[in-house]
Structures are given as C-alpha cells and as structure tokens.
Amino acid sequence: MAHSGNILVTGGAGFIGSNFIRYVLEKTAFKGRMINLDKLTYAGNPENLSDVAKAYKGRYVFVKGDICDFKLVGQLFKKYQPSMVAHFAAESHVDRSIFGPKDFIETNVNGTFSMLEAARNFWNGRSDVRFHHISTDEVYGSLGRTGAFSETTPYDPRSPYSASKASSDHIARAYFHTYGLPVSISNCSNNYGPRHYPEKLIPLLILNALEGKPLPVYGDGKNVRDWLYVEDHCSAIWRILLRGEAGRTYNIGGGCELKNIDVVRSVCRLLERVRPSASNAALKGGSYSDLITFVKDRPGHDRRYAINSSRIRRELGWKPAHDFEAGLAATVDWYLKNPAWLAAVRRASYSEWLKKNYASRK
Ligand code: NAD
Ligand code: TDX
C-alpha cells in the first residue's frame, strides 16, 4: 500500500496521533509529507516526535495552532494541499470532562466542524480525497454483562466527553450525506502503549507504582474495558485511509475485555518481574499490590465496553498484532527506558487535580 499525497494530521503531538505519525513514516510505504497541526494543550508534547522531526526533516512539518482557528486551517489546506486528513485532535479525558466540559465542546464539536468545513471548501467536490475522523466506542454508552457494540448500535453517550465525540461523529457523517465530503469514521476501544499521558489508567498505574504512590481503583474495580495496543489502532486507521469506504464507519477493538482490577493486578505482576518491589526503595518493603486503593467512583461511570470489530477484520483484513501481555510488557519497558519524558510530564503535575476530585474510600 503506497500513498504519495500529503496528510494533514490534527492532534499529532498527543498519544495516539504521535504513534500514528511514527507508524506511517517508519513502517509504511507512504512517500508524501505529514503536516501535524496541534495546539499543544497539557496533553500535547513535542517531545513525542522530536526524533521523528529530525529523521524526517522536510517530510514532517509541525504547526502549532488550534483546529478551531478556521482561517489557519484554511491556510494549511492551501499551503500543503493534503489529499487526506487524519483528525485526532480532541480533549480526551473523561474525568476532566466531568469537572470542566467547556473545552470538550469547544475542541471536539466546534473544532471538528471547523476542520470539516475547511476540507469541504478546499476539496470542493473531489472524491479522490479522504477525511478520516477518529472517534471512540464511548459514543455507544454502556453495556450489560453480554453483547458488544457494532457499527449499528444506537448512540447513547453518558459523559460530556462521549457526548462531545458523539456530536462530532454526527456532524462528520452529515458532511458525507449532505455535501458528499468523503468522510470515514472509526470508533475504537481503550488504547494503551508508549507516550500515553499518565492521567489515563495504565500509565498512571505504572508511574504511581514505581514511585510507591497509591494505585486508585474507581468504585468496585469491576468496570470492563476492551484494550488495544496503540500501534494496532494506528495500523487500522492507515488501512481505512487507504482502503476504507467513504461514508462508512469502522469499529476497532482488541477483543480483550478486562475488569479494571485485573488490569491493575497485571501491571503489579509485571512490575514485580521487571523491577521487583524488594529492590525499589520507594516501596519501603511493601509490594506493588499493597498500593491498590479503592476510591470514590467516577460519576456516571460506564460499566462495560466491548467492541465487535468484525467489519474491519472482514472487509479490510485488519487484525491486532499484539495481545495484552505483549503490549503491556512493551509499554512498561518504554516507560522504564524514557525517564526524560517522564520528568517532563511530571513537571506538568498530571495528578494534582485528580487527587482533589477523587478521595480515597479508605
Ligand atoms: P490526547 O489527549 O493524548 O491528545 C490529544 C492531542 O490533541 C494533544 O496533542 C492536544 O494538544 C491536541 N489538541 C487538543 N485540543 C486541540 C485543539 N483545539 N487544536 C489542536 N490540537 C488540539 O488524546 P489521544 O488519547 O491521543 O486521543 C486521540 C483521539 O483518539 C481523540 O479524538 C480521542 O477521542 C480518540 N480516541 C482515543 C482513545 C484512547 O484510548 N486514548 C480511544 C478511542 C478514540
Ligand atoms: O485512576 C483511575 N482509576 C480507575 O479505576 C483512572 C484514571 C481510571 N480508572 C478506571 C476508569 C475506567 O473504567 O479505569 C478505566 C479506564 O479509564 P481511563 O484510562 O480514564 O479511560 P476511559 O475513561 O475508559 O477512556 C479512554 O478510552 C476511550 C480514553 O481516555 C478515551 O479518550 C477513549 O475514547
């Protein structure tokens, strides 16, 4: 699969966007230029791509800016003439959306509108182009004990985050039906992997455990998420960009349902193997699992997500290449080997506000 036009990526300095840019430049036959438009919010980190920026000078371009800035987005279309857009930029953390929904509406709804409108103006009826909108399984709401979300499951978002993503999905779909803009959409389950900002469960657990801090488990720890290694999400998006159909939605998932408490135990077990607590002074003689602390539940906490990804598997021949054990080992290894990245992120004091909002039940 080769593609030589330019790609405009939004939110490429964040977790999935930076992994996507790295994946496409390093592991595919892509020959064009990659333009990364990112506002560098607390979640955007140019360090995520500093080596890529050096290695792909001329083919990788970083632009600091806001997707809501319609004039800037229009200028970027004119200047770089992209034939594809991979739209990742969003406010992405459910807890933050509960305590402050405004930025979520602004970026996820208005920002997506601004991107779609600029694409429509610039592409002006072309069908040989593609706008891919990256979304989440959370738009479908919460499942009971059985079943899985398919592409035809009705939307039922519960948090300000998922409601803002649902709105943006609807607007993106409307641009396909109303204006014929070649839009595709993917709804993916929980990602994990390198460069994940440590407000999200897995990186938070790894960093807190290494520092001997509590491992906060919301509620009873039995909420279920379907975990996918980030590079497998990137390979799915790339396949959709090259071979997916305009106007079509693709669900992406790892087929890896786990209770949160089991994820926490897996991280503790893995750390005991690669960085035994007995040799970690921060643990003061205790084990990693001693740090597990049940805390107040997240308001409106969705109980279970599971994804039926048979469409993308059948139609585009995609499947994940990493199981949870291998993906988690690669993730922990990356965090252990990148202390400079961690120090930079710690300076942003990622967990201060969480401490304020979720008190320990003990
Ligand atoms: P992230 O929070 O790590 O990164 C978001 C990036 O967007 C950051 O670099 C940030 O600076 C940038 N950004 C935010 N507002 C912006 C604005 N107004 N203009 C320009 N840039 C802006 O998020 P992520 O986890 O990498 O998620 C990326 C996308 O994937 C999101 O759309 C999210 O909804 C979706 N998604 C995430 C997951 C997951 O598990 N993380 C799963 C499914 C879907
Ligand atoms: O400290 C914690 N303790 C805890 O029990 C945190 C941060 C989370 N949790 C629970 C809440 C969830 O059930 O772990 C689960 C995962 O939480 P997050 O990492 O915050 O992810 P989630 O809310 O499931 O959303 C993620 O997946 C879907 C991403 O953040 C979204 O952007 C994506 O759309």
Image (cartoon, rainbow, N blue to C red):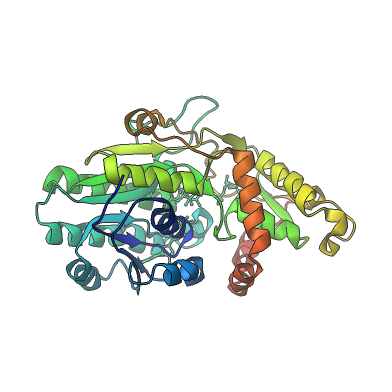
The answer, for residue 271, to whether it is visible in the render is: yes
Q: Residue at x 38, y 50 (%)?
A: 28
Frontmost residue, 330 versus 173: 330
Q: Residue at x 79, y 51 (%)?
A: 288
Q: Quadrant of residue 315?
A: top left
Looking at the rendered structure, the number of numbered marks drawn on it comes to 0
Is residue 323 shown above or below 168? above
The quarter of the image that holds ligand 1 is: bottom left
Q: The N terminus lies in which quarter of the figure? A: top left
Residue 44 position in % (x across, y down): 46, 67
Q: Is residue 37 left or right of residue 78?
A: right
Residue 268 position in % (x across, y down): 74, 47
Frontmost residue, 69 versus 87: 87
Residue 43 position in % (x across, y down): 49, 65
Q: Residue furthest top?
A: 146
The answer, for residue 136, to whether it is visible in the render is: no
Q: Residue at x 78, y 60 (%)?
A: 212
Q: Is residue 79 left or right of residue 107?
A: left
Q: Residue furthest left?
A: 125
Residue 141 position in % (x across, y down): 44, 39
Is residue 104 shown above or below 319? below
Is residue 145 shown above or below 296? above
Frontmost residue, 286 versus 235: 235
Q: Residue at x 44, y 43 (%)?
A: 138
